[in-house]
């Protein structure tokens, strides 16, 4: 009962609707019979239609709140899953660093090698990035640290839009 309150609220709302409508039908039947035993069909139809509308309007708030609770639980679960996935992805990224200008070697044809990692491991051979100007961006696909002037990473991934 308390493990899924959204579903419970939705069920209670539907039960409240049914009880309300049945109560209106019973009241309409009782009042339509009249004192002399004549049945007033128009009064019964009014209770039939009016009872449905009143029961629906009175239970829709409970059902809507139950739906809201279910949706918020789903969003919470998805965010937790995405946070764990992002943390795992960030833990697997290479830890490349940018060398100060004084430690960089001049490059031929406007390119330089990928900078070594913080734990002094050598980067893979043959991967290059354009000559650094100011700022860098990390490729979402391969984790390579690129200069801001580079529009496409060596792996073919475009620079994200939020880096301009």
Image (tube, grey):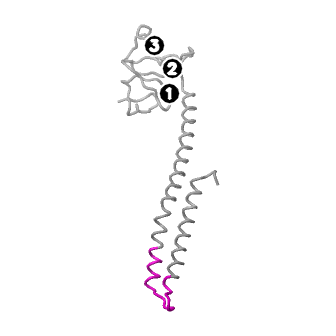
Q: Is residue 47 magenta?
A: yes
Residue drawn at (49%, 87%) of the image: 34
Q: Which residues are magenta?
A: 31-50
Up the image or down, 65 lies above or below 85; here it is below
Q: Position of residue 150 (x, y in %)?
A: 38, 25
Q: Secondary structure at mark 1?
A: loop
Q: Are marks 2 and 1 in contact (CB under 8 Å)?
A: yes
Q: Earlier in the sequence, mark 1 or mark 3?
A: 3
Read off the residue under disc 2. Answer: 96
Q: Quadrant of residue 92?
A: top right
The structure residue drawn at horizontal position 48% and vertical position 64%, both measured from the top left corner, is 58
Helix, strand or loop under label 2: loop
Q: Is residue 148 above or below residue 20?
A: above
Q: Residues within 10 Å of mark 2 (few under 14, many from 20)?
A: many
Residues packed near mark 1 inside 10 Å, few (<14), some (14 to 19) or many (20 plus):
some
Q: Residue at 55%, 59% (x, y): give it.
A: 10
> Does 27 appear in magenta?
no
Side (left or right) of 19 relative to 107: right
Outermost residue, front side: 35
Name the secondary structure under disc 3: loop
Circle 3 residue:
99
Disc on res. 143: 1
Give whichever of 5, 123 is nearer the camera: 5
**x, y percent for residue 79:** 53, 40
2 or 1: tag closer to the N-terminus:
2
Query: Looking at this view, is 13 or 28 the one in front?
Result: 28
| Quadrant showing the N terminus | bottom right
Measure how far apart labels 3 and 2 are at the Cα level: 10 Å
């Amino acid at each position: 009962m308390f493990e899924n309150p959204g579903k419970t609220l939705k069920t209670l709302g539907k039960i409240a609707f049914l009880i309300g409508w049945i109560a209106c039908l019973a009241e309409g039947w009782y009042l339509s019979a009249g004192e002399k035993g004549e049945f007033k069909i128009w009064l019964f139809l009014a209770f039939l239609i009016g009872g449905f509308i009143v029961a629906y309007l009175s239970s829709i708030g409970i059902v809507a709140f139950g739906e809201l609770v279910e949706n918020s639980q789903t969003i919470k679960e998805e965010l937790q899953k995405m946070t764990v996935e992002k943390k795992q992805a960030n833990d697997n990224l290479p830890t490349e660093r940018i060398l100060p200008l004084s430690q960089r070697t001049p490059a031929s044809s406007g390119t330089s090698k990928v900078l070594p990692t913080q734990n002094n491991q050598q980067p893979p051979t043959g991967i290059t990035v354009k000559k650094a100007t100011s700022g860098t961006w990390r490729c979402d696909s391969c984790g390579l640290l690129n200069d801001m002037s580079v529009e496409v990473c060596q792996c073919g991934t475009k620079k994200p839009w939020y880096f301009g």
